[in-house]
Image (cartoon, rainbow, N blue to C red):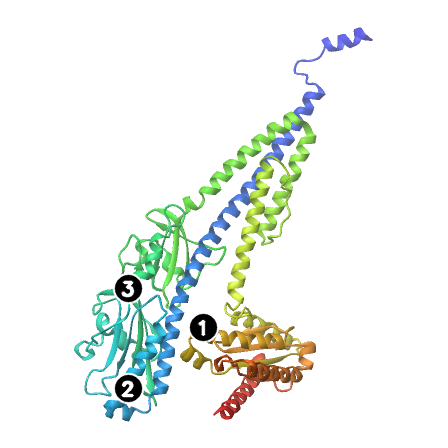
């Protein structure tokens, strides 16, 4: 038998391979195939994740700057509209204003104090003014205060003689004629003000008495202050930000002059200006033969804030990641050859987990569980993926808080109320609605703001909100206006709504009696309505009944306190 066996060895054909060789070849083929599949999946997910992260980063940066600018614009617009409301309300009559010089001087002096109060804490307004209509007086009348920077105090400057210029002269009198032509609060596009020798953005509004134009109130923001932050903003290495109009006219650009058409920078961009990029969406275009992606947001004053970056730079991390994954795959192949099937299984399992986790992450599931105990490249990748998931989740939560939470009181805001209304409308449509709406209005908020300052006004709002939340602890409370709150009540709180409102009134009475300062007394007008399918066809019907009852209560409270 030994000879036979030896003969068989001697007679082995050329090219014979042992079972061990075949096994190694089989394992090698499996490893290579598996490595190619796993590498392809990882590269695909890396491409998607990198592009998605770039889109989220650019959109989040754009959104952050939008919130910053909108806060500035909204503060200025509120100040202008508040001043105009006061000016119209405080004017006794057009006749006396036109004929009584002493009254006119006192009225103008009071308006100066109102606008000075509205702008005293502003770090953006460089000029405010009131111009009375020349049709009411035989001479130019009004006032203007300005400063060259926000670090300086306002100084009175001479007013422009409107009648010396044509109505279409935007540089000199556009701030006066434009709001009169629109009849409402208007944001002027950035322009050069020849009177103050600077570029600015103006918020202006006309005010009327008994339907007749009295004048125009406005505030100006230095355009250079708006773009200071954008000068230093860089997206990747060569990306940048700029401002333009909805028609594609450039207001600010690091490379092009103001007034240039946006097509000079990015071809095809103007076709998207009526939309906005979302959290995972970027628009594409071509700039000087180079592909670029861009994100943009519409600001309160109508300008578009645009961020753009070269696609090559956006994909730079992806390219590096693809190379890294390629090297990892080759390492795994060699590692499998040496360490056999057992080690291959240990490598394959965490890779599958990471792939599944990356898939869940790409679907918006940020609570992924990955094994980070492995002391190799897989462990590093797992740590990176877990950190990325945590950062994305934190960013999503921050955006959700900004979108649905009122920053002053901590309760839900008007956007959240709109979602609640949609849910209630669905219940009404499905014949399963059973709810009530309570409308609250904090009285004398404007008096608190005007007399004691906005900090006292904010304190009054928070006190009122806390009482509402204590009264309806299990119902959602929404702040839908400056001094207006809404509670949507269901279940047990709906069944005992009258008792709870009585307790609310009693608590208000007790707390007001215990405060020492009169400005800390908070009075809240309340109106309530319960959904009645026989008379209500939508949520707005219920709200209107509650709102009407609240205003009746408010009038009674005013009469009682007068």
The answer to whether one can see residue 530 in this image is no
Q: Which residue is mark 1?
A: 455
Q: Quadrant of the N terminus?
A: top right
Which residue occupies the foreground of this view, 251 or 226?
226
Spatial separation of the CA atoms under disc 2 and disc 1: 28 Å
Residue 165: which quarter of the image?
A: bottom left
* Residue depicted at x 29% and y 52%: 255
Residue furthest out toward the left = 164
Q: Residues within 10 Å of mark 2 (few under 14, many from 20)?
A: few
Q: Residue 48: where, in percent of width, then height?
A: 52, 47
Label whose residue precedes the other's in the sequence (2 or 1): 2
Q: Is residue 435 above or below residue 269?
A: below
* Residue depicted at x 37% and y 82%: 85
Identify the element where label 1 is drawn: helix
Residue furthest out toward the front = 516
Callout 1–callout 3 Cβ contact below 8 Å: no
Q: Is residue 454 above or below residue 260?
A: below
Callout 2–callout 1 Cβ contact below 8 Å: no
Q: Which residue is mark 2?
A: 106
Q: Residues within 10 Å of mark 3 (few under 14, many from 20)?
A: some
Residue 124: which quarter of the image?
A: bottom left
Q: How many marks?
A: 3
Which residue occupies the foreground of this view, 362 or 195?
195
Q: Residue 372: where, in percent of width, then height?
A: 62, 41
Q: As drawn, is 127 to the left or to the right of 29?
A: left
Q: As drawn, is 84 to the left or to the right of 332?
A: left
Q: As drawn, is 23 to the left or to the right of 509?
A: right
Q: Which residue is mark 3?
A: 149
Residue furthest out toward the right = 1
Spatial separation of the CA atoms under disc 1 and disc 3: 25 Å
Q: Residue 202: where, in percent of width, then height?
A: 31, 70
User: Which dot, 1 or 3, sits closer to the camera?
Assistant: 1
């Amino acid at each position: 038998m030994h000879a036979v066996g030896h003969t068989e060895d001697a007679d082995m054909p050329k090219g014979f391979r042992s079972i061990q060789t075949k096994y190694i070849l089989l394992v090698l083929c499996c490893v290579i195939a598996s490595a190619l599949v796993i590498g392809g999946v990882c590269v695909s997910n890396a491409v998607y994740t990198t592009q998605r992260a770039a889109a989220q980063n650019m959109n989040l940066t754009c959104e952050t700057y939008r919130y910053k600018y909108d806060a500035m614009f909204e503060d200025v617009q509120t100040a202008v509209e508040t001043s105009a409301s006061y000016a119209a309300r405080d004017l006794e009559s057009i006749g006396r204003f036109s004929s009584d010089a002493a009254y006119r001087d006192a009225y103008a002096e009071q308006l100066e104090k109102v606008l000075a109060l509205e702008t005293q804490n502003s770090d953006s307004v460089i000029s405010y003014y009131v111009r009375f209509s020349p049709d009411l007086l035989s001479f130019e009348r009004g006032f203007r205060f300005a400063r060259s920077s926000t670090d300086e105090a306002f100084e009175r400057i001479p007013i422009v003689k409107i009648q010396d210029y044509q109505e279409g002269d935007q540089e000199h009198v556009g701030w006066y004629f434009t709001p009169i032509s629109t009849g409402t609060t208007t944001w002027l596009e950035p322009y050069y003000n020849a009177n103050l020798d600077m570029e600015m953005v103006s918020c202006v509004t006309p005010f009327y008495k008994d339907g007749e134009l009295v004048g125009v109130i406005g505030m100006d923001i230095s355009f250079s202050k708006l773009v200071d932050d954008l000068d230093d903003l860089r997206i990747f290495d060569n990306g940048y930000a700029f401002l333009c109009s909805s028609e594609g006219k450039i207001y600010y650009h690091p490379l092009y002059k103001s007034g240039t058409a946006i097509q000079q920078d990015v071809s095809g961009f103007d076709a998207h200006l009526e939309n906005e990029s979302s959290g995972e969406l970027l628009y594409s275009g071509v700039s000087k033969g180079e592909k670029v992606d861009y994100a943009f947001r519409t600001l309160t004053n109508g300008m578009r804030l645009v961020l753009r970056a070269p696609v090559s730079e956006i994909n730079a991390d992806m390219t590096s990641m693809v190379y890294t994954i390629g090297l990892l795959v080759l390492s795994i192949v060699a590692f499998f050859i040496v360490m056999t099937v057992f080690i291959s299984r240990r490598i394959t399992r965490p890779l599958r987990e990471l792939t599944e986790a990356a898939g869940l992450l790409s679907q918006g599931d940020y609570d992924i569980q990955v094994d980070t105990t492995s002391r190799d490249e897989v462990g590093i990748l797992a740590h990176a993926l877990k950190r990325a998931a945590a950062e994305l989740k934190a960013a999503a939560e921050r955006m959700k808080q900004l979108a649905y939470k009122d920053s002053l009181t901590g309760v839900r805001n008007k956007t959240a109320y709109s979602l609640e209304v949609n849910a209630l409308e669905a219940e009404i449509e499905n014949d399963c609605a059973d709810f009530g709406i309570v409308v609250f209005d904090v009285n004398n908020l404007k008096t608190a703001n005007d007399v004691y300052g906005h900090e006292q006004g904010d304190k009054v709002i928070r006190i009122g909100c806390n009482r509402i939340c204590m009264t309806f602890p299990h119902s959602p409370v929404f702040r839908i206006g400056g001094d207006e709150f809404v509670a949507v009540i269901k279940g047990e709180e709906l069944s005992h709504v009258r008792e709870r409102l009585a307790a609310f009134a009693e608590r208000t009475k007790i707390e007001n009696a215990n405060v020492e300062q009169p400005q800390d007394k908070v009075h809240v007008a309340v109106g309530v309505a319960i959904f009645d399918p026989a008379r209500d066809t939508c949520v707005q019907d219920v709200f209107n009944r509650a709102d009407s009852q609240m205003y009746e209560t408010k009038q009674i409270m005013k009469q009682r306190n007068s």
